[in-house]
């Protein structure tokens, strides 16, 4: 995730939001890591997918901006290399064979997306590949509408996300020498765990909306959002968030 002033709750992430990395597991089939390859995992979080890449024999480095997430990753996987850095601006002395990213790049605001793509391109050797999945155009549209209703028109100014279309993102990659071989945008309704699943989701991922508020006001806003979203997102005891994902496979031109 991109640099943020907020602290991520690694324990809550692991306990209630493991779907983030579990859904990313099949993205590894597109990456197809090979023994001995140097691979960079951007937005590695608590390191589960980084470990899976390493298990397949690659020499992997995990990158994340959250010290809390990386502390948990290092505790679980002390044999791996993790680096604290901003996904919108980073550099390494040696190039990688591949750059991988799951559920991270939508945390990089539009004004910083160019820097992120430039950093990714610079990190790849000629012919190296880029495989990523993140929130795409229309992602959590129902949630965002509820945020506007509860918090007012200023809600968009607090948004920490950028959900591009393929038409937005593919040209950005091409400008930095990354040839897009495959790009898709698809719905992926995502169930949350437990009766309080949406409450936990809002507190985990909606910190920029809640942080300026007093604890009491934040609790009230979360309650309002949960009740506003219940008719659309709650069915048969399960909360399901309206995710849409963009998935991209590209390679750096020789």
Image (cartoon, rainbow, N blue to C red):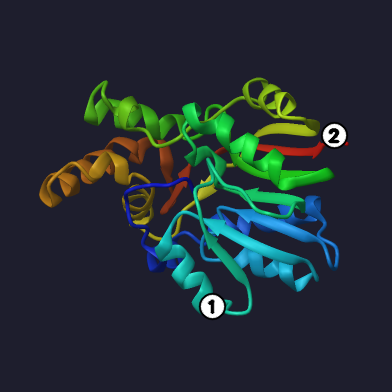
Locate residue 188, reporting x and y percent. Answer: 60, 41
Question: Can see residue 245?
Answer: no
Name which residue lies at 44% across and 59% down: 193
Locate residue 192, reporting x and y percent. Answer: 46, 54
Name which residue lies at 41% across and 54% down: 237
Mark earlier in primary sequence (2, 1): 1
Q: Is residue 30 above or below residue 58?
A: above
Disc 2 crowd rating (10 Å Cα; few below 14, some 14-19, many 20+) is: some
Q: Residue furthest front?
A: 93
Q: Is residue 238 above or below residue 166?
A: below
In-image side of 69 versus 183 (left or right): left
Q: Is residue 159 above or below residue 129?
A: above
Locate residue 104, reporting x and y percent. Answer: 55, 46
Q: Is residue 187 above or below residue 164?
A: below
Q: Which mark is residue 253?
A: 2
Q: Which residue is mark 1?
A: 76
Element at label 2: loop
Number of numbered discs overlaid on the protein picture: 2
Name which residue lies at 66% across and 70% down: 51
Q: Which mark is residue 48?
A: none
Q: Nearer the viewer, residue 247 or 226?
A: 247
Give the distance between the C-alpha atoms of the residues marked 2 and 1, in whole angstroms.
Answer: 36 Å
In-image side of 193 versus 63 (left or right): left
């Amino acid at each position: 995730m991109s640099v943020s002033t907020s602290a991520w709750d690694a324990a809550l992430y692991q306990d209630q939001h493991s779907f983030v990395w579990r859904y990313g597991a099949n993205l590894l089939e597109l990456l197809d890591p090979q023994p001995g390859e140097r691979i960079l995992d951007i937005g590695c979080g608590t390191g589960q997918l980084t470990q899976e890449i390493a298990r397949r024999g690659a020499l992997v480095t995990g990158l994340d901006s959250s010290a809390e997430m990386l502390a948990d990753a290092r505790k679980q996987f002390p044999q791996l290399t993790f680096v604290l850095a901003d996904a919108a601006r980073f550099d390494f002395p040696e190039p990688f064979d591949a750059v991988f990213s799951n559920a991270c790049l939508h945390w990089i605001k539009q004004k910083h997306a160019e820097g992120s793509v430039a950093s990714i391109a610079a990190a790849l050797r000629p012919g190296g590949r880029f495989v990523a999945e993140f929130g795409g155009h229309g992602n959590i549209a129902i949630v965002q509408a509820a945020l506007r209703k509860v918090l007012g028109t200023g809600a968009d100014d607090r948004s920490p996300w950028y959900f591009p279309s393929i038409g937005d993102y593919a040209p950005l990659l091409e400008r930095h020498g990354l040839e897009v071989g495959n790009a898709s945008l698809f719905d992926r309704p995502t169930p949350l765990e437990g009766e309080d699943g949406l409450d936990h989701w809002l507190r985990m991922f909606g910190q920029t909306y809640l942080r300026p508020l007093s604890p009491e006001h934040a609790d009230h806003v979360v309650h309002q959002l949960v009740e506003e979203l219940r008719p659309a997102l709650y069915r048969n005891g399960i909360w399901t968030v309206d995710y849409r994902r963009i998935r991209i496979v590209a390679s750096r031109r020789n």
